[in-house]
Amino acid sequence: MTALNFGDDMAITDPSGPATGPLTTADGKPLVKALARSQARLRRKAFFLVLPLLAFVLITFVVPIGQMLQRSFYNDGFSANMPLTSAWFAQTERGTVPDDAAWQALALDLQASAEARNIGTVGTRVNYDMPGTRSLFTSTGRKVRRGIDPPYQQTLLEIDDEWADPQLWSTMREASKPYTANFYLASVDRTRDAEGNIEQVDERQRVYVMLFWRTFWLSGLITALTFVLGFPIAHLLATLPMRKSNLLMILVLLPFWTSLLVRTTSWMVLLQQQGVINDLLVWIGIIPDGQRWQMIYNQTGTIIAMTHILLPFMILPLYSVMRTINPSYVRAARSLGATSWTAFRRIYFPQTLPGLGAGAMLVFILAVGYYITPALVGGSSGQLISNMIAQHMTGTLNWSIAAALAALLLGAVLALYWLYDRLVGVDNLKLG
Amino acid sequence: MKTTLIMSTALAGIAFGAAAQEVNVVSWGGAYETSQVEAYNKPFTEETGIKVTMIAADNPATPLRAQVEARNVSGDVFDVEVSDAIRLCDEGALVEIDPAMLPAAPDGTPAIDDFVEGALLDCAVANIVWGTVISYNTTKFEDNPPTSAVDFFDTETFPGKRGLPKNPKRTLYLALIADGVAAADVYDVLDTDEGVQRAFDKLDTIKNDVVWWEAGAQPVQLLADGEVSMTTAYNGRIFDAMVGENQPFEVIWDGQYMDLDMFVIPVDAPNPEEAMEYLKFATDTQRLADQAQYISYGPARKSSAELVGMYKDGTTEMAPHMPTAPANLESAVLDNPEFWADHSAQLTERFNSWLANS
């Protein structure tokens, strides 16, 4: 730090002669500028060295994630394919009863869109906000594909009288703007009514808010469990003689290197009702055969399997910090009269905090985004928000709401990170 | 030196480009993929010299949509469900397929009359008919085996856990059938709020006894492990375990859910001509009948039915194991892709909410 601290202080006088101005190099340039130039060259070199990495991160990480997140507030499924109707919505105010111009715009748009084979995209977009309308668009599209004649309103209503529904027009108005907050509203179980006011969705449809809470609560619980289980192991690893601790280290690392799926499936073998543990309990007579414990395909299964899988992420940073703790501090405390508990609580434990912070952070953030393990062993009560994101990505193919849910999750994690930084300080993290 | 390298690379590229007649087929993996490799791919390569590369996906519609959106299509032929075929076609992601191009049946019946109802869409051609069926482990019910969808919901008389897929499409219909709705009326009932509520109320009665599955291989494993005593599963997978691996399973055809699998070609497919060749070849009468030797999925052509013979073991008659066998069709629910295109999002949300609030 201090070595680089040149700058204005460079204007010290030359000790060999009278004060004639700033220091210069041999060829007469001011030293400050020459130094800055050579420093800049070094920085440029260093920058070129990291350029491949930077480009890699940008192309494989920042751009795709940015594009994905953009979908959470940008969806031009309606506006791009229904230009005339969108223009009519832009010119009129909310609540305007559709006039002849509106019906004409709608009819012509539907016909053009059906001909270009993107009416499905339009219907899908409207269907997100108003379920049950997708087939209205596609079936009307099929009928008007070859052409549509005035009077447009009458023709459309003859095809399906649902076209007169004010709720539909209100929803189309919402969808006519490519930028929308509706996907974020849906991610917190909110929707808009016909007047555009925000309201909670039907009680039977609410799911996301509850899943967010469950995700954070379970992640916190799993973090606490890995701490309780991992702390003594890390301590053993750090204090045992090298030969024994190496063996123990292998026991920690072997599962860490084993495929996640293998470990999850092993838990299924162990925990299921006809599995090893239940068989054993029945065999030694603790439980009767008819009342085998349900330890998997529910929240318990998620907690057990995820705690095991994430355990090394707690042990390794703790271990690396504990290795550096000088044992003479604890000995000094004991010799000054502290009980072993006090010496642990006041001398040893505070020194492990950087490792604990790093471990807790790693485990918590990984747990918040976990999805394979809960999907396999979580049943219905052990599902997390990431399972819902995966379902929208691969099942319902509603990538906009998947992006909105993911953005909320990312935001929540960043907020927790910020909170951690304020409370503990990120500088205190020690990853290894 | 450098020039030589560039030249040789370019030449190799040209040589490779000329020789590499190939087609990439994206399908569902597992026993189903094996049947397609044996019945379609091997004879196709033999006849035309075009190399077929099989790619497995959980649901090929997902990579298809991702590839079309990213404008970087690498698959030529995709095997997708009907509702996805309709949706992707409406979204302009698929090439239109004229049924007149498809080969006629051996007796000269044009393809358009030879395929079963709903098997030919604007952008898709069906290759198989498959069913979701109830299956049980015979060792659990030796004296009094279950026989119907009603028994599936009766955990008092037929104890043990139940396996169900974690989606509304293949659970709600079963609840309604078990509640006394006729197979033909299922979608009329589901179209009303009361009907949906009725289905959820029925599901509520066994909610605590259900183990939910997602991938097609899971229910077979659950049943084999004894983790569930009864489950719904894809009929081909159950057949594979029952006949191929001698598992003590039995199938209940009451309340089967019948579905088609479709071949589609995305716009901008890298090898569109080869893709069309493959599609025509794989959906002809003989090929569709051949695939039924390897897995008990019904051919989508009527003319293939009489050509379906024995399982590859040479002793098992395939006909009674087909979802299309007349006896198995009595209370079959046909997939309604239009309904699901409309209501999938809404019912999935309600289903997830129902599941999570347990």
Image (tube, grey):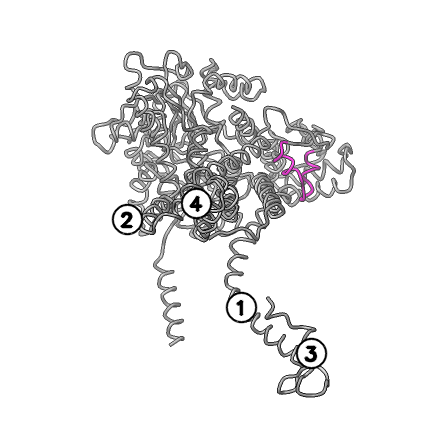
Which numbered dot is residue A12? 3
Local SS, label 3: loop
In the depicted view, which residue is nearer to us: B63 or A306?
Answer: A306
Local SS, label 1: helix
Give residue B319's quadrant in the image.
Answer: top left
Q: Position of residue B1 (x, y in %)?
A: 37, 77
Visible in this render: residue B96?
Answer: no
Q: Which residue is mark 1?
A: A48
Label 1 in the same subunit as label 4 = yes
Q: Position of residue A334 (x, y in %)?
A: 46, 45
Label 1 in the same subunit as label 3 = yes
Q: CA distance from mark 1 to mark 4?
A: 36 Å
Visible in this render: residue A28?
Answer: yes
Give residue A13's quadrant in the image.
Answer: bottom right
Q: Earlier in the sequence, mark 1 or mark 4?
A: 1
Q: Residues within 10 Å of mark 2 (few under 14, many from 20)?
A: few
Q: Position of residue A142 (x, y in %)?
A: 58, 35
Q: Is residue A269 left or right of residue A35?
A: left
Q: Which residue is mark 2?
A: B46
Local SS, label 2: helix
Q: Which residue is mark 4?
A: A315
Q: CA distance from mark 2 to mark 1?
A: 53 Å
Q: CA distance from mark 2 to mark 4?
A: 57 Å
Q: Label 4 is found on which chain of the structure?
A: A
Q: Amino acid at mark 4?
A: Ile
